[in-house]
Image (cartoon, rainbow, N blue to C red):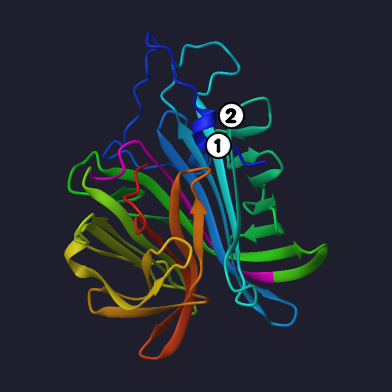
Amino acid sequence: MVIPLAALLPAPPASAAAPAAAEVVPGQPPSLPQDFGAHPAFRTEWWYATGWLSTSDGKPLGFQITFFRSATGHDAANPSRFAPKQLIIAHAALSDPAAGKLQHDQKAAREGFGIAYAKVGNTDVRLDNWTFQRQADGSYKAGVAARDFALDLRLAPTQAPMLQGDHGISKKGPKPIQASYYYSEPHLAVSGSITRGGKAATVTGSAWLDHEWSSSYLDPDAAGWDWLGANLDDGGALMAFRIRDDKGGVLWSHAALRDASGRITQFTPEQVRFSTLRSWRSPHTDAVYPVATQIQAGQLTWQLTPLQDDQELDSRQSTGAVYWEGAVRITRDGRPVGRGYLELTGYVKPLKL
């Protein structure tokens, strides 16, 4: 049973003291391996795995597994094991053109009792029977038993982590406080199985993992963001995002391109531009999403084409948001150059973390 988020957050007593949230400190970048784990002093954190899978007959599928940790602001001194100091939220989705729409599920619960947690020191998050754990060899084991499908996947690194922004400090606006700690693991080699209708199928593929944590992420005027994480066929990795205001203007943007040798090129806000090639109107929410997009970073351009148009995820029973989360093909000058995931938020209503 999915529990609405509001039901998980009883109002704290008026005398409760909300703990001060930790902030990103310029000049103090994240440090691996210890920062693979959770950071409960920060308000918001997520582990976000997306990728392309292929069945034994070559059929393409997209998948998303995301675990969120959210500090509630509840009195940190409350000794009760039932005190909702942290929430654990999870989303899972499968994109299959044969299904005609996104298959997805969601869960939310307060942390505790071994049922829901995000552990410090190494990636180990759980929400009931959904798990995402980093193993001793650096690979990730993901297990999700969703409503319409199940995922049992291993995601093995083939490259070093990619520290985003300034050595892992990613600016999200002009103010120093508008930043997050952020690293990615591109080109994860995926193996495992998916189960639908009681039938399991072996899959292989490639994935992208983001781990990000912050307490002051968005400008007060921000309505949402567009984000891309792409594994390029030549071994490179591309990350790009823009943060939009409620009038469609751009408050901040950034892109980073790592080539196969490991050299990273950073692109400043004025060098990054998102352009709509084609929009899709959701029959579920009436929102209009730029599902086919061109991204320009400096002198380079990439075109994004969705695996299918309907990849809208309604998470109003967990995070409260509706967003488009889609597998996309990447081309340049008409030639295929990679695959990735495009996230489009704030198109139904302004998104607030």
Which residue sits at x=73%, y=63%? 192
Residue 50 is labelled as: none
Q: Which mark is residue 111?
A: 2
Residue at screen point 36% across, 49% down? 168
Range shown magenta: 204-219
Which quadrant would residue 104 be assigned to in this image? bottom right
For the N terminus, the quadrant is top right
Q: Tag 1: residue type?
A: Ile
Tell me the amino acid under the disc marked 2. Answer: Glu
Place of residue 39 in the rendered image (x, y in percent of width and height, measured from the top left): 47, 34
Q: Residue at x 52, y 76 (%)?
A: 308
Query: Which of the two discs, 1 and 2, labels the residue nearer the N terminus?
Result: 1
**Category of crowding for the residue at label 2, using alpha-carbon neighbours closer than 10 angstroms: few (below 14), some (14–19), many (at least 20):** many
Q: Which residue is mark 1?
A: 88
Residue 221 percent across, percent down from the top left:
21, 47
Q: Is residue 62 visible?
A: yes
| In-front residue for pair 156/160 | 156
Q: Is residue 134 left or right of residue 330?
A: right
Q: CA distance from mark 1 to mark 2?
A: 6 Å
Image marks 1 and 2: residues in contact by CB distance under 8 Å: yes
Tell me the quarter of the picture where residue 153 sits: bottom right
Residue 59 at x, y percent in the picture = 67, 80
> Which residue is at a point 70% across and 65% down the rendered structure image?
191
Magenta stretch containing residue 262, yes or no? no
| 57 w.r.t. 323: above or below | below
Magenta stretch: dominant secondary structure: strand
Specify whether residue 213 is painted magenta. Answer: yes
